[in-house]
Amino acid sequence: MDELMHWSLETDFGVPVRWLEEKAATTMGNARRSARLLQRDGIDSVYLMTQTWHLPRALYVFKK
């Protein structure tokens, strides 16, 4: 999924991808790794994009 979003952002929307977390095996791991990655550049909020049925769980995890 990460590769698809990466490709779509750059190809469909012309948006260069600056951060890419591709090592986590779980949503919690992705949230933690992404937070560390983004905080290094002073970013403390994000837009969370996921499938509708994943959203409640993903929101819960990323807010923590």
Image: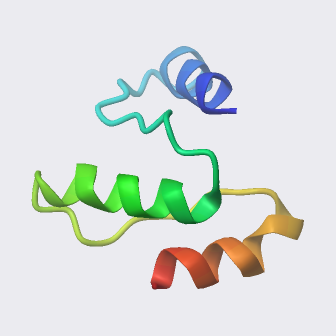
Residue placed most toward the observer, 58 or 11: 58
Q: Would residue 8 appear left or right of 18 to someone viewing this image? A: right
Could you say where residue 48 lies in the image, as x and y percent from the top left?
A: 55, 63
- Quarter of the image holding residue 5? top right
From the top left corner, tell me how far across and down residue 1 is, in percent.
70, 33
Q: Which residue appears at 29% of the width and 31% of the height?
A: 18
Residue depicted at x 57% and y 77%: 61
Direction from residue 54 to residue 63 in the image, left or right: left
**What colour-coding does the image apply?**
rainbow
- Drawn side of residue 46 relative to residue 51, left or right: left
**In the image, is 51 to the left or to the right of 44?**
right
- From what the image shows, is residue 58 above or below residue 10? below
Indicate whether 18 appears above or below 27: above
Residue 7: quadrant of the picture: top right
Residue 19 versus residue 24: which sits nearer the camera? 24
Tell me what residue is drawn at x 20 percent, y 62 percent.
Answer: 43
Percent across and percent down for residue 58 are 66, 71
Q: Residue at x 53, y 25 (%)?
A: 6
Disc tally is 0
Q: Please provide percent x and percent y for residue 64.
A: 46, 85
